[in-house]
Image (cartoon, rainbow, N blue to C red):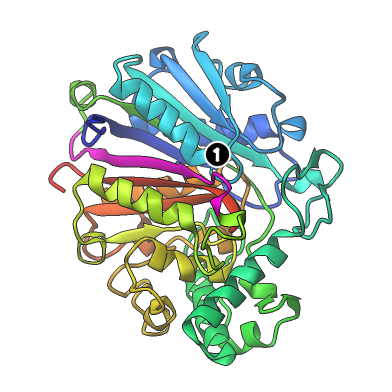
Amino acid sequence: MARGIKDKVAIIGMGCARFGERWEDNADTLMVEAFTEAVADAGIDTSQIDAAWQSVGFDGVNIGPSGIPTSIALRLPNAGVTKVENYCASGTDAFRGAVYAVASGGADIALAIGVEKLKDTGYGGLPVRTRGSTWDMIGVTGSAPGNFAQLANGYRAKHGIDAADLKRAMAHVSVKSHANGARNPKAHLRNEIDIDKVMNAPMIAEPLGLFDCCGVSDGAACAIVTTPEIARSLGKQDLVMVKALQLATSNGWEMQQAGGWDGSYIHTTRIAAKRAYEEAGIKNPRAELDLLEVHDCFSITELVVMEDLFVSQEGKGWTDVLDGFFDADGEIPCQIDGGLKCFGHPIGASGLRMIYENYLQLQGRAGDRQRAKPPKLALSHNLGGMPSQNVSAIAIVGTEDA
């Protein structure tokens, strides 16, 4: 029986590049920006890194088909570098590789780094079959907005929600995230917006308007992990510990006509959440979690995921949103850094960027957006693919006493 990895691995350093339209930079410089911050934060030398996992979605315009360019860019000590690609959940999957290496005793200190130069692909979010000229969306039909619009309509139909009410809840998600992102110097979009602007924005895919969709950005993020014992030998105190890491991948059930999936939720997220809570020893996520970073590629995704993570009751996530439960001053803030909505979604970097925010908050180092009472348990949720076929990745991190 699997024993889990709770409290076997500590994060000793993290870094995050500024997300945005980084036309003047390549993938190497973005990685170096995030890596430099992480190494300084960890207080180690590059020569101490035993192994690395690197995540990227569009390797043809980023780093190529191997980990060699990453090793060269970061001047790693001939450590093994594994390139990871798992749709939009790639960043958390790279983190899992590094964490598992340390937990198994395969490495003393391991690195996870994610990067994407998404602007250079020409991807605008509305392809028919290709994103730019580099990558065919094998196995995925339609557009991302179109697919997640179906999630919105499936959710509304199942729970009998008035279309105007759901639209207001989705608008609140976007307004809340923009208010948070305005306080984050590393976010791509830092402008606050109001409900009227969201409600009257151009329609992209009914019911998703312009401000219901995350942007296209370039960025990188990085994590360095080790054992608690080594962390303490390096002089680290008040450690941020990995409490759980779980992935769940679609097996085709959602797309079978007799399968029973009604298109109103993310099946793999529910599975990954149950596994993660068991691993972390969490019985009541609504009462025990202090902070959330979820894969808000679209406003409806964040809303639905609140239920799939068992934080909101099924069919009640939209009312929790409107009640301010997930606002920066709410019970469990969600996207306190601005989320994908304000950072954009450089595919390989997003999962690690989410963990980066939770790490800062747990240490009380998040600046203007820091919660007055530093959290003890924080969850990040990274989703790759479409509602009907996807991979869900969940990382729970927390303080030593959580």
Q: What is the three-letter code of the residue carrying label 1?
A: Ser
Q: Residue at x 31, y 46 (%)?
A: 276
- Residue 365 makes an appearance in the image: no
Q: Residue furthest right?
A: 133
- Residue 343 makes an appearance in the image: yes
Q: Residue at x 33, y 74 (%)?
A: 313
Q: Which residue is mark 1?
A: 90
Q: Is residue 396 left or right of residue 306?
A: left
On whether residue 380 falls in the magenta region, the answer is no
Q: Residue at x 76, y 54 (%)?
A: 141
Quadrant for residue 65, please give it: top right
Give the magenta range.
Answer: 237-253
Q: Within 10 Å of the Cα at label 1, are there few (<14), some (14-19), or many (20+) other Cα atoms?
A: many
- Residue in front for this viewpoint, 143 or 366: 143
Q: Is residue 155 above or below residue 232?
A: below
Q: Position of residue 319 (x, y in %)?
A: 40, 83
Q: Secondary structure at mark 1?
A: helix
Q: Is residue 396 left or right of residue 168?
A: left
Q: Position of residue 158 (x, y in %)?
A: 51, 79
Where, quadrant-wise, is the N terminus in this rendering? top left
